[in-house]
Every structure is written in structure tokens, then in C-alpha cells.
Amino acid sequence: MNQIVAMMWHDPMAVIGFAFIGASATLSIRLHRKLLGVGIDTSALFIRIPNIAVWTVPRAYLKACSKHGWSAWPAYALWLTGVSGVVLLVAGLFRLAD
């Protein structure tokens, strides 16, 4: 436990980057399950490359949200957390060498 706390104090950007990437994955699964609930199967998108799921599942969600009256913010939040998580992780790993 002390090592985790020490890592968080030494390089918080990498830890926050991992947290944002995890939030992006959670949002992607949420969108996928919501699309499955209305009959749009995006399972094949998860089998290929996870990066494809990050971009194509939100696009499918945005197409379906206008039909079903859903809010569009989860798709945009997925993109925001995914991109910012990768940027923070890479920047944090470069700072880790110092």
C-alpha cells in the first residue's frame, strides 16, 4: 500500500491517466450495453481492436441517441476521457524517468 501511495505522490499524472483510461473503458461498456438494449449489436467491434471500440461504439451511440431521445454526453465523455487519459499517461511516464 505504501508503494502505491508513493507512486501517486511521485507521479500523479500517470496514475490519473490510468484512471481516465479506466473511465473511458467503463463508459464504452455502458454505451455498448445501452445499444444492446435497443437491438444494436456492437459486439463485433470489441473483438477486433479495442481502439476501434473506442471510436466506433460512440459513433453508433450518437446515431442511435437521436432516435431514442438519449443524451449525447456519454459518447463525448468517452472520447474526452480516453484521449486525455492517454496524454496524461504518456506525459506521466516521460516524467517518471526524472
Image: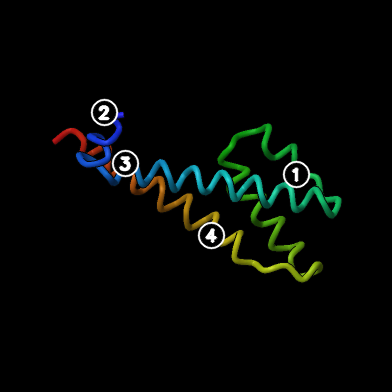
> Which residue is most to the front?
1
Q: In the image, which is nearer the foreground, mark 3 or mark 1?
A: 3
> Between disc 4 and disc 2, whose residue precedes?
2
- Find residue 38 and report its image quarter: bottom right
> Does 36 sit left or right of 26 as displayed?
right
How packed mark 3 is, by other alpha carbons closer than 10 Å (few <14, some 14-19, many 20 or more), is many
**66 over 56 or under it: above or below:** below
How packed mark 4 is, by other alpha carbons closer than 10 Å (few <14, some 14-19, many 20 or more), is some
Disc 1, SS: loop
Amino acid type, label 2: Gln
- Which residue appears at 51% of the width and 48% of the height? 23
> Between disc 1 and disc 4, whose residue precedes?
1
> Which residue is most to the left?
98
Q: Which mark is residue 3?
A: 2
Q: In the image, which is nearer the foreground, mark 1 or mark 4?
A: 4
How packed mark 2 is, by other alpha carbons closer than 10 Å (few <14, some 14-19, many 20 or more), is few
- Which residue appears at 75% of the width and 39% of the height? 43
Amino acid type, label 3: Ala
Disc 2, SS: helix
Amino acid type, label 1: Thr
> Between disc 3 and disc 1, whose residue precedes?
3
> Does 7 sit left or right of 81 as displayed?
left
- The x and y percentages for residue 29 are 65, 45
- The x and y percentages for residue 54 are 58, 47
Give the CA distance from mark 4 to mark 3.
Answer: 19 Å
Q: Which mark is residue 77?
A: 4
Q: Which residue corresponds to mark 3?
A: 14
